[in-house]
Image (cartoon, grey):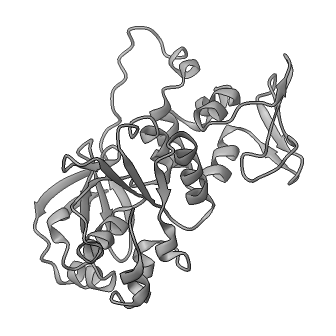
Amino acid sequence: MNCNQFNTIPLEEVLLAIGHLPTKQNEKEAWYLNPFGTENHASFKLNKRLNIWYLFSEGIGGNNTNFMQKFLNTSISEILIWAENQNFSSFQNQKTPNRKFENPLKTYEITEVKEIGHHALLEYLNSRKVENQTEYIKEIHFQMNGKNYFGIGFKNDSDGYEIRNAYSKICLGKKDITTIKNNSKSLLVFEGFFDFLTFKNIEKSLENEPSDYMILNSVSMIGKIKNTINNYENIELYFDNDEAGNRAVEMIKSENENAEDCRILYSDFKDLNDWLIHENPSNERQLNYKRR
């Protein structure tokens, strides 16, 4: 899917996918409460004929791509990944019957996968204070555009790798979530894998048995999981302290009454890993933090 294709999908479908219904509508237009904030009177107008929106309370508007850029606060490429995962019916109808859609040619080749050993990667892990959690990650060497690169690789459920080093943040292969199961009734959801590694560092101090874990690898994957986590008795959410994180928490909590926003642990920091980097891991705040 590209931006032109995404922008032809009725914005009504997009809004429904993220849990928003109109307060009133007719054949030409629909009105919604502000999807980006809290309000009592609908100021978000959708022009159905033109498939564009305008938010009167903020004086902004645009197409589907503009909307999701503000809603998810992420890149266009990750917005399109999110859209692909929604399986919008109107987009499926655009596809020609019996046509074979081939994956685009890979622009990379993974040349080696091994245990973390390169000093630069070890130093990077040390700077993030997760150097002791190497069982979940690999050292990935790959070629791209005729050049050789290497980084820390975290595998997702589609056999792609999130790649991180001190200079880059990319995904090799298909973007997807990562699930780690321990036959638990509790699920912990993380936005990125460094937050997951951070939690594993402090998990013993919380005196709880290992849970099931789900790492989004991007907040834009939130729509993929919201209907698959209903079977857990407890759901703990560890997202970033930003607008996209706020919306992701609200989306899950609105559909799962047993979901808990656990960002109180690191409320003064960007994310869980940022808290670990700047706080003393043995401080009173951590030790007094109670999981339900």
For residue 172, say whether it is visible: no
Q: Which residue is depicted at the point 19% across and 50% down?
A: 182
The front one of 195 and 255 is: 255
- Numbered disc total: 0
Where residue 78 sits in the image (x, y, percent)? Answer: 49, 48
Locate residue 112: give its quadrant: bottom left
Residue depicted at 33% across the width and 81% down the height: 128
Give the vertical position of 61 relative to 241 (above or below).
above
Residue 156 rendering spot, x and y as whole percentages: 27, 49
Q: Is residue 275 left or right of residue 146?
A: right
Question: Who's the residue at 63% across and 60% down the image?
Answer: 243
On the image, the x and y values in percent for residue 95 come to 49, 16
In the image, is residue 167 above or below residue 186? below
For this rendering, which residue is in front, 4 or 114? 114
The residue depicted at 52 percent of the width and 36 percent of the height is 83
Q: Pick whichever, 201 or 255, lies toward us.
A: 255
Relative height, residue 90 to residue 56 (above, below): above
